[in-house]
Amino acid sequence: MDTNALLYQDLEKVLVTREEIAKAVKELGQKLTEKYRGEDPIFVCILKGASVFFTDLVREIDAPLTMDFMMVSSYGSSTKSTGVVKIVKDLDKPVTDRHVVLVEDIVDSGMTLHYLKKVFANREAKSVSIVTLLDKPARRRVDLKVDYSCFNIPDAFVVGYGLDYDEKYRNLPDIGVLHPKIYENQG
Ligand code: 5GP
C-alpha cells in the first residue's frame, strides 16, 4: 500500500515510515538474539496492537523461543486508558521459571504493563522484560522500566502497523498521527 492510499487520508502526517520500522525491528531482533540465546524465553504478544510488530520481530530473532498471545482490555475511552486492566485472553501455558518477554505496541501511561508485570511476577516467571515499538515518555503515570523501545514519540494519538482507532488503520504499513477530526466528537 502506498501513502496515497485511501486510509492515509485520515492522517495528519506520517510519523515513522515502514523503512525506519524495518531497520529498528531488525536491530532489536539482533539485540534480543544475543540476550536470549540458550534461554528458551516466552515471547508474549499483547493483542491486538502488537500483532504486526510481534510477527516481524520474532522473525529477526535467531534463537529458539516460544510464542504466546494475551489479550487485555483497559477500561476507558478509545483514545485514553484508565489503568484498570482485564485479561480477555490468557496465555496457553504456565510461565513458572521461564523468561517472559512482553511485546507491546506502545507504552503510554505505563499502567497496562505495570499491571501485567505484577501478574507475571505473581506467576513466578524467572524474569519479565518489556519490549515496545513505541514509547510516549511524556505521558507516563507510573514508574515502569521499559527494557527495549524502538522509537520515542511525542504526545499524539498514532495509528498504523498494528495500532488502531476504533479497530481501523491496523493495516497501514507506516505509523501516522491520526487527524483529530476523526475522533474529536467521540466519547
Ligand atoms: P497505557 O496503559 O500505557 O496507558 O496504554 C497502553 C495502551 O493504550 C496501548 O497498548 C494502546 O492500546 C493504547 N494506546 C496508547 N496510546 C496510543 C496511541 O497513540 N494510539 C493507539 N492506537 N493506541 C494507543
Image (cartoon, rainbow, N blue to C red):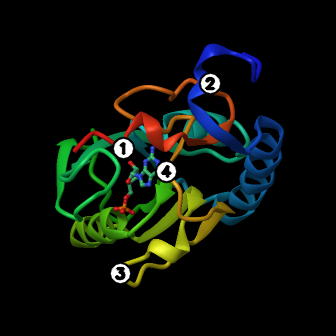
Alpha carbon separation for disc pair 1 and 4:
11 Å
93 over 145 or under it: above or below: above
Q: Quadrant of the N terminus?
A: top right
Label 2 to label 3: alpha-carbon separation:
35 Å
Residue identified by numbered label 3: 142
Q: Quadrant of the C terminus?
A: top left
Q: Name the front one of labels 3 and 1.
A: 1
Q: Is residue 140 left or right of residue 135?
A: left
Q: Amino acid at mark 3?
A: Val
- Tag of residue 157: 4
Residue for badge 2: 9
* Residue, disc 1: 184
Q: Nearer the viewer, residue 118 or 8?
A: 8
Pointer 1 or 2: first along the chain: 2
Residue at 50 percent across and 65 percent down: it is 130
Disc 2, SS: helix
Between disc 4 and disc 2, the foreground one is 2
Gap between marks 1 and 2 measured at Cα:
16 Å
What residue is shown at x 76% (from left), y 36% (from top)?
18
Q: Residues within 10 Å of mark 2 (few under 14, many from 20)?
A: few
Judge whether 40 appears above or below 153 on screen.
above
* Residue 51 shown left or right of residue 26 in the figure: left
Q: Residue at x 75, y 24 (%)?
A: 3
The residue depicted at 83 percent of the width and 46 percent of the height is 23
Q: Amino acid at mark 2?
A: Gln
Residue at disc 3, CB closer than 8 Å to ligand 1: no
x, y (%) of residue 167? 37, 28
Q: Is residue 164 visible?
A: no
